[in-house]
Image (tube, rainbow, N blue to C red):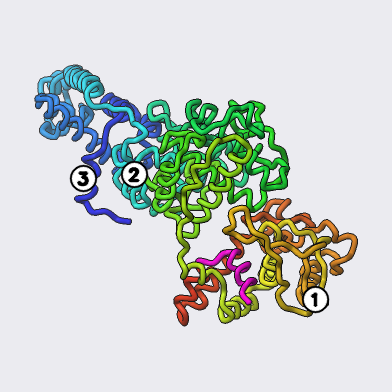
């Protein structure tokens, strides 16, 4: 990105001076080496070896000093601060050496004392010139002391970046919507060492200068740049990342949220007495955790990893949840409860157990367009430890709003049924209407599935792509939800006599009546003989026994880690290059792989069918389940 000279001038005009500028100019005035003071205070401008840059910076600072003096009716000081006391006076002739002076004036036959007497008579004594320069330096240092009190400001977190950074740097940061020092620090802490990736013209060296500058001024800005930014994120311990975001009453992940005592629900307007309550919940967050536990057969699950970073953690139901992994349903329910609780505490300033129907209706309206956007919305890729994490990506689609209301209705029904609350304010809230076109479009047509199959045959024959081929066919044939597929073990599988075709899944009504829940057939997950053959080949490619019923395969995860990393990415860490062939994969790994494949399908078909390309780009694993349900 380039900016015009006029824009640069305007950005220069917005810049402020801090005490580092004054300290640097003291070194300039006194004629001492400026290398140390430049690197300490002004290295963010560039390298000291760039003499033109240093000269331009000194001139800009002097101009700012002079402008400040004129604003305060001190024209003499304005002239004084522009003078370079170490520059020879161009109005005076160049001073010769004593030998040159004697040769020029025919004094070679004179004694040195006589030559010196004539020289002093012509040019004056050196001590007089030094005294005059010394007085000038003293006056300039006094002027700097005055200017320091007058115009030097400490940087503050909410200052715009162009108030303190070089105009070029500031323009590049603003091009990616980094407008304040706080936003800059959040990006650095939120992305780590490679925070400048994607910002035009800010490479490693400039990025390091910016980080160093922020650390120097941390005492006044309050913006601490974490140690985790000094190393690649992959090598940073999770315990260190967990400390990046401090606990606060702000829009932070729920494990970092400090809920004020008057908003935690202990004294909610809709609470029943503790003696009547059927669950061991003292406050709203306890109730949420116990509700989530009920979605896993009553077994506690590992929210402890979310709460372990809390310095004020106490022994409550919230903190004693142990090592059972979250199911797909629990993750979805947790997300909606977290969003609602954050909105209640930060925006509405009311406890969940004090909500009425009007509050609930206001939240449904909020979901249509969460505002302020920069506070509530951010990319999905931002992890929970990052200060860039946000609860939403943007406004929710009608189906997502409907799902959120379904889940919150379920939460409040749980709290009422267990006598934690007296009444259900969500009972009066109607479900948002579905968009008919949206419902129809969330599955693949026969032609679109043909495109998927064609693209599957074109992908390289890597371990990850062999897993992808089998996974898509497994979704299509069984209609299982994502968490069931991820947790499935080979020992759970049964092979039918059918060569191919979809295995029809039974359904049961969900708690809300809104979502159907797929179930595997009694005794296990049933595969057609054709899909079983595909699984056998996939197991063999992982170095496992090809027979599905072999005893060694009983506890093997159906979907496993890529086994050819050592050939494709030999620089990877040891644990990745040589994985446990029987181990499973994370939901995020599978989700991202399938989404990337759908994106490739969209690109492949875009030229001949733009509408289908849009559908592929929007598709998710749920589309595979719905395609299974299509007769």
User: Which numbered disc, 3 or 2, marks the residue that appears first in the sequence?
Assistant: 3
Q: Are marks 3 and 2 in contact (CB under 8 Å)?
A: no
Query: Circle 2 sits in a helix, a strand or a loop, which is it?
Result: loop
Q: CA distance from mark 3 to mark 2?
A: 16 Å
The local crowd at label 2, few if under 14, some if 14 to 19, many if 20 or more residues have their Cα within 10 Å, is some
Q: Residue 333: give x, y in percent of width and height.
A: 58, 48
Q: CA distance from mark 3 to mark 1?
A: 72 Å
**Quadrant of res 538:** bottom right
Provide the residue designation for mark 3: 10
Provide the residue designation for mark 1: 529
Q: Is residue 50 left or right of residue 283?
A: left
Q: Residue 100: give x, y in percent of width and height.
A: 19, 32
Camera-side residue of 203 and 97 = 203
Disc marking residue 179: 2
Q: Is residue 346 above or below residue 514?
A: above
The local crowd at label 3, few if under 14, some if 14 to 19, many if 20 or more residues have their Cα within 10 Å, is few
User: Which numbered disc, 1 or 2, marks the residue that appears first in the sequence?
Assistant: 2
Q: Magenta span covers which residues?
A: 618-631
Q: Nearer the viewer, mark 3 or mark 2?
A: 2
The residue shown at (40%, 34%) is 39
Q: Is residue 478 left or right of residue 56?
A: right
Q: Quadrant of the C terminus?
A: bottom right
């Amino acid at each position: 990105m380039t900016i015009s000279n006029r824009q640069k001038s305007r950005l220069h005009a917005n810049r402020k001076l801090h005490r580092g500028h004054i300290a640097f100019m003291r070194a300039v005035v006194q004629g001492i080496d400026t290398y140390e003071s430049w690197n300490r205070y002004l290295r963010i401008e560039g390298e000291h070896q760039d003499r033109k840059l240093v000269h331009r910076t000194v001139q800009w600072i002097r101009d700012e000093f002079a402008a400040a003096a004129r604003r305060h009716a001190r024209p003499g000081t304005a002239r004084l601060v522009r003078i370079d006391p170490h520059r020879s006076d161009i109005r005076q002739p160049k001073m010769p050496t004593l030998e040159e002076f004697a040769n020029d004036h025919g004094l070679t036959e004179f004694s040195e004392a006589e030559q010196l007497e004539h020289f002093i008579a012509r040019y004056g004594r050196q001590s007089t010139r030094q005294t005059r320069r010394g007085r000038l330096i003293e006056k300039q240092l006094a002027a700097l002391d005055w200017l320091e009190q007058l115009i030097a400001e400490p940087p503050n977190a909410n200052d715009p970046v162009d108030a303190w950074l070089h105009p070029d740097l500031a323009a590049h940061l603003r091009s990616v919507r980094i407008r304040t020092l706080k936003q800059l620090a959040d990006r650095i802490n939120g992305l780590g060492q490679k925070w400048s990736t994607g910002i035009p013209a800010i490479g490693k060296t400039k990025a390091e200068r910016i980080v160093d500058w922020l650390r120097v001024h941390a005492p006044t800005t309050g913006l601490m740049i974490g140690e985790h930014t000094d190393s690649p994120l992959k090598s940073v311990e999770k315990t260190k990342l967990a400390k990046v975001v401090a606990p606060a009453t702000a829009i932070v992940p729920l494990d970092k949220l400090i809920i004020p005592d008057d908003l935690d629900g202990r004294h909610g307007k809709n609470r029943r007495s503790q003696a009547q309550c059927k669950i061991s919940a003292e406050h709203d967050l306890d109730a949420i955790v116990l509700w989530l536990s009920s979605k896993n057969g009553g077994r506690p699950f590992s929210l402890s990893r979310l709460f372990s970073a809390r310095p004020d953690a106490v022994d409550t139901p919230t903190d004693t949840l142990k090592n059972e992994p979250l199911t797909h349903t629990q993750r979805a329910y947790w997300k909606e409860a977290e969003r609602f609780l954050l909105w209640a505490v930060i925006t509405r300033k009311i406890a969940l157990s004090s909500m009425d129907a009007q509050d609930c209706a206001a939240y449904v309206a909020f979901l249509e367009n969460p505002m302020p956007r920069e506070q509530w919305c951010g990319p999905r890729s931002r992890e929970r430890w990052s200060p860039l994490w946000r609860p939403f990506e943007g406004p929710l689609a009608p189906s997502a709003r409907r799902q959120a209301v379904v889940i919150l209705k379920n939460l409040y029904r749980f709290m009422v049924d267990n006598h934690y609350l007296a009444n259900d304010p969500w009972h009066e809230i109607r479900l948002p209407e579905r968009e008919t076109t949206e419902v129809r479009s969330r599955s693949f047509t026969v032609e679109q599935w043909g495109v998927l199959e064609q693209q599957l045959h074109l992908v390289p024959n890597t371990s990850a792509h062999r897993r992808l081929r089998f996974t898509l066919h497994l979704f299509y044939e069984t209609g299982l939800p994502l968490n069931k597929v991820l947790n499935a073990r080979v020992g759970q599988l049964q092979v039918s006599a059918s060569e191919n075709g979809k295995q029809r899944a039974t359904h049961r009504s969900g708690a809300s009546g809104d979502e159907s829940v797929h179930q595997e057939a009694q005794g296990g997950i049933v595969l057609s003989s054709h899909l079983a053959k595909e699984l056998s080949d996939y197991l063999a490619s992982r170095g496992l026994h090809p027979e599905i019923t072999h005893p060694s395969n009983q506890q093997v995860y159906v979907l496993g880690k890529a086994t050819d990393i050592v050939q494709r990415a030999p620089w990877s860490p040891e644990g990745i290059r040589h994985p446990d062939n029987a181990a499973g994969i994370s939901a995020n790994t599978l989700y991202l792989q399938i989404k990337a494949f759908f994106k490739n399908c969209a690109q492949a078909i875009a030229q001949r069918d733009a509408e289908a390309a849009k559908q592929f780009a929007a598709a998710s694993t749920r589309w595979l389940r719905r395609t299974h349900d299509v007769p």
